[in-house]
Image (tube, helix red, strand yellow):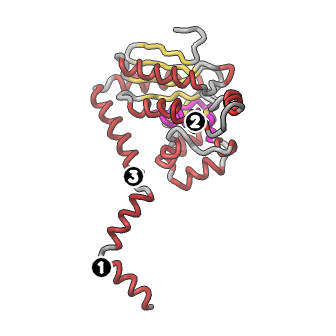
Amino acid sequence: MESNATVVARSDGPVTTILLNRPDRLNTITIPMMQRLRDALEVAESSDARAIILTASGKGFCAGQNLENLAATYKHQSSAVLGSIIAEHYNPVIECIHNLSIPVIAAVQGVAAGGGFYLALACDFRIAAQSARFVPGLAKLGLAPCLGGSRALVDALGYARAMELTLGMDELTAPQAQAAGLVNRCVEDEQLYPTARALADRICALPRRAVSLTKQLLRQAAREANEPTPKSEAWIQSIAASEPEHAERVRQFLSK
């Protein structure tokens, strides 16, 4: 274990705890940090781990993208490069969390903002300390939800409430996030890790294959719930319009 690592992983029996470890910067996201996080997740998957707890050191879970690094990048490249950074370095972490056969429990304290908010949202469970604050916040930067957050928000909240949260609110407290269905449990700060560990232990006591298949099916169900797209809707509409009843209903309407 590196003393200065931005991501630290430790195993305790069947549970692997992964710690975001840039407390002096509220664990803001950098490319090396996300690469380390993906490596830690994959190592846990390939080991005997049966559950992962993703948490952070210091006062905040993750305050999102490190804007100083981003500004420095923009001095040498077009700001459009942000899309490539997200696609190449950040999205693979989210896909890794989704595709792991074992559940990932986010234990969130302090602020989870921007990319940090969507990172927590990508996990299978979220346990929040009373101190936690959830800040979607990217619209203020001229950006939209990322890291799979748009689909996750609509799944959890529905379209109207997802729009309200991303464009009409500054933040949610931990109790508000729980009431909205974004958080599984809200606990006193000192009970954050013990609660996450108790949930992990409960999962570990279940047959591993059943846990894996359950996660696979529920993730698939969430994806399929969002299948209707403008393209697929237009295809369905063409089928409906080909029925004789459609032409008759149009004729009746026009004759009135």
Please tell me whether residue 122 belongs to the stretch shown in magenta.
Answer: yes
Q: Residues within 10 Å of mark 1 (few under 14, many from 20)?
A: few
At a point 52% along the width and 54% down the height, the residue shown is 159
In percent of width and height, residue 39 lies at 46, 20
Q: Is residue 126 above or below residue 12?
A: below
Left or right of 241, for residue 142: right
At a point 44% along the width and 18% down the height, the residue shown is 16
User: Which dot marks residue 117?
Assistant: 2
Residue kind at label 3, given as amino acid type: Glu
Left or right of 195, for residue 74: right
The image quarter in which residue 136 lies: top right
- The mark lying in front, picked from 2 and 1, is 1
Residue 146 vs residue 160, the one in the foreground:
146
CA gap, disc 3 and disc 1: 27 Å
- Secondary structure type for disc 1: helix
Q: Residue reaching furthest bottom? A: 255
Q: What range of the chain is rendered magenta? A: 113-136
Residue kind at label 2, given as amino acid type: Phe
User: Which dot marks residue 244?
Assistant: 1
Left or right of 130, for residue 42: left
The answer to which of marks 3 and 2 sits earlier in the sequence is: 2
Q: Residues within 10 Å of mark 3 (few under 14, many from 20)?
A: few
Residue kind at label 1, given as amino acid type: Pro
CA gap, disc 3 and disc 2: 24 Å
- Secondary structure type for disc 3: loop
Residue 191 in view (yes/no): no
Left or right of 39, for residue 241: left
Q: Quadrant of the C terminus?
A: bottom left
The image quarter in which residue 209 lies: top left
User: Which dot marks residue 227?
Assistant: 3
At a point 60% along the width and 25% down the height, the residue shown is 30
User: Which dot marks residue 118?
Assistant: none
